[in-house]
Amino acid sequence: MDKREQKSNLARLLATENITVEHNNVQTAQFDIVNRILTLPVWKEMSNDLYDMLCGHEVGHALYTPDWSKEKDSIVKKVPHSYLNVLEDIRIDRKIKQKYPGLKSSYFKGQGELRDRGFFGTKDRPLNTFKFIDRINIYSKNGSVEPVPFSDEEKILLDRALKTETFDDVVNLAIDIAGYAKEEKTPEWENQSDDFQEGDFDDDMEEQESSGGNNDNQEQDEEDTSTPESGENESGEEETKQEEKTSSGSEGGYSPDSLENDIGSETDKKFNDKLKQFNDKEARHFVYTNLPEPNLDYAVVDHKIILDKLNSNYKKYTDFNKYAFSEFNKFKKETMPIVNYMVKEFEMKKSADEYKRATISKTGVINVNKLHAYKYVDDIFKKMTVIPGSKNHGVVIILDHSGSMGNSMYGTMVQLFNLTMFCKQVGIPFEVYSFTDIHRKSVVNDEHISRWSTDYDILDPNNASFKFKAKDKWFENCLLLNWVSSKQSLKQYNNAMLNLYKIALEYRNYNLRFTSNVDDIPPHAPTPHWARLGGTPLNSAIVITAEVVKRFQSNYNIQKMNTIFLTDGASHDSSEYVKYDQDGKLIKDYSNNDSSVKIRDNKIKYEIKGGDYRSNKTTNLLKWFRVKTNSQLIGFYLYSGRTMSYWDKASLFGKDWYNEYDKQRKLALKSKVMISKKAGYEKLFITRNTNLVIEDEELNINENMTVSQMKRNFGKTQKSKLASRVMLNKFIELVA
């Protein structure tokens, strides 16, 4: 966790609410009171104490400064804005230190740093030459080490400044001090060259807000008020630049600008001007975006629609249907005994685990057979064994429907069938989806719309996978096709499985069509255009699936949610986000660097980091998914060829990928599966796509074998059958 993230968490803890904290290349710190967004500049090398002081100061505004934007225009006609900055900072700093006494030390040290660097312009200048408001500001920050002169009349107003309780108190006091300032006479002081040089300060600094975020703390106990200054008001609006003194003819004959020019706080302005010089101008500018709301009515295609469309497509291919039906029945005949065996193993393992967790408890009922021993033993009550009930599991499976899955499709489908057959047997609710970049009209209306078509308004909430708003991160179009569901009747389930098997057969038999022996080519039926493999909008699928899983959990009252993603490649992605153009129309815009785009889920107050690579974004989205859904997130990653690419190794096994991959490769020599915990999943199982194909060996037994040989061959065959069912095996391990 870097320093920015640490201080963001500190700010949230101090605020006792999950405020939004942004670090960006801005001139001064800002706190948006209405939207609860704290924006902090990126400063060059800031000490930990100063950082904590500024965070505490900004949180003080979050907790105690009200939204006064509606009254602002009328107030600043009566009093300079800098007066409100100075006096409000005193109030909120006193209150935040009272609430968190541990901050007093950070304030004291942080303000000392600023004083030593000449932030208030008091070096080599007599303090009696400063205006009253400036002496109040200096006293609140440096009074314990730098005596400040006040007249008896001023001491009365100073005492009020140190004891203000409400923002109204601040406004009323500011008006009174402004009235005094108009009559105030201070010794003339000829401005000299600024004693602050850029070279004088090259360390320690990074955050502060609208009121200045800095305070040179004088540990003057609870009455001590310190506060950083800022050129912006509490709602984050930057103060207008000083202009020529003019008379508006309004209250008092002063305009806001003329008031500021005439009697405004010199030290408040000086502080803000100097603070801006320490902003890291080379710091990366982040684009903070929001997570868009998935449009499930568009993005999810129900299993009833899928079933109807596939039945309509295949009904005219009689020969192919006979062939597919025969192959499917053969597959089920071979698979069902193994699935039934694994169901029994699962139930036994679950029962054994439950028994281990069983507890013995007294019933409160006297055991009459022990009454004779009541003088010698205390335990004369009947006991019962309490076995905790198993949690209600649920499974959502998301299948990659991209073009690169072609060689893996048959093996993936049969693994999928094994898993759904198992869930059906043990009564675990499940849903099977595939994600694709096709358009909904292609499925529902049989329209042949190109995946890359621009003939539709993708920002139209009625015609897109997301309900985009301004400041949303852009995610590409994505559909979840609901192929199989536990909600289906047994007849519908078998029909859906058969239809999927037909698609899998087409991919398995594809190469056979180009053989020279025509007699070996099985019957053929074209896959519907919308069911063909396409792109890889994995990141979009993750965001949509989170809402699907939340709905699934609610519908079935799931206690232990299991979500499985099965894919063979990286996601499409971009650094695009949504904004308004000059005409108020939603458009897409680009960030120069995807790692500069941060995504916020405002519902759970979670920030999703960008990444320099597409895999980084996916990893961070998966981490968010686990927090969002409280789901056990499992991944299956398929690779083709003899080994993985260097890019895959680095993206899936983390920074120390070379050593980690080598270790996992050795462990996988027998299991044929590598495991990574670095890719965002709780566990990511990595295997070669050829390992998914289930080829059940025939039991080799003859009359010449001994009993031990028969037993050994049976065990070997059974072990091979179980091991080849990779997905089901790993799933059972996780849920038993």
Image (spheres, rainbow, N blue to C red):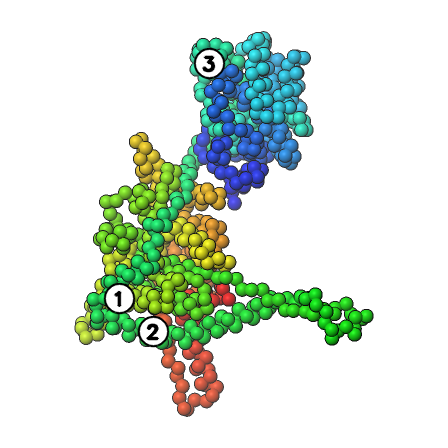
Q: Residues within 10 Å of mark 3 (few under 14, many from 20)?
A: many
Please tell me whether mark 1 sits on a helix, a strand or a loop.
Answer: helix
Q: Amino acid at mark 2?
A: Phe
Give amino acid for label 1.
Answer: Glu
Q: Secondary structure at mark 3?
A: loop
Question: Which one is in front, 77 or 71?
Answer: 71
Q: Residue sitting at 53 percent across and 69 percent down?
A: 350
Closest to the camera, between mark 3 and mark 1, is: 3
Give the residue pinned by disc 2.
331
- The residue lying at 33 percent from left, 55 percent from top is 301
Q: Amino acid at mark 3?
A: Ser
Tell me which numbered mark, 2 or 3, is placed earlier along the sequence: 3
Neighbour tally class for label 1: few under 14, some 14-19, many 20 plus, Cα within 10 Å: many
Q: Mark 2 and 3 residues: CB-CB less than 8 Å, in contact?
A: no
Cα separation, mark 2 vs mark 3, equals: 86 Å
State which tag comes first along the sequence, 2 or 1.
Answer: 2
The residue pinned by badge 3 equals 255
Relative to residue 232, is residue 391 depicted above or below? below
* Residue that label 1 marks: 506
Across and down, in percent, residue 200 comes to 54, 26
Identity of the residue drawn at 34% across and 34% down: 580
Q: CA distance from mark 3 to mark 1?
A: 79 Å
Measuring from the top left, give residue 584's x and y in whole percent: 32, 33
Classify 652 as above or below 575.
Answer: below
Q: Earlier in the sequence, mark 3 or mark 1?
A: 3
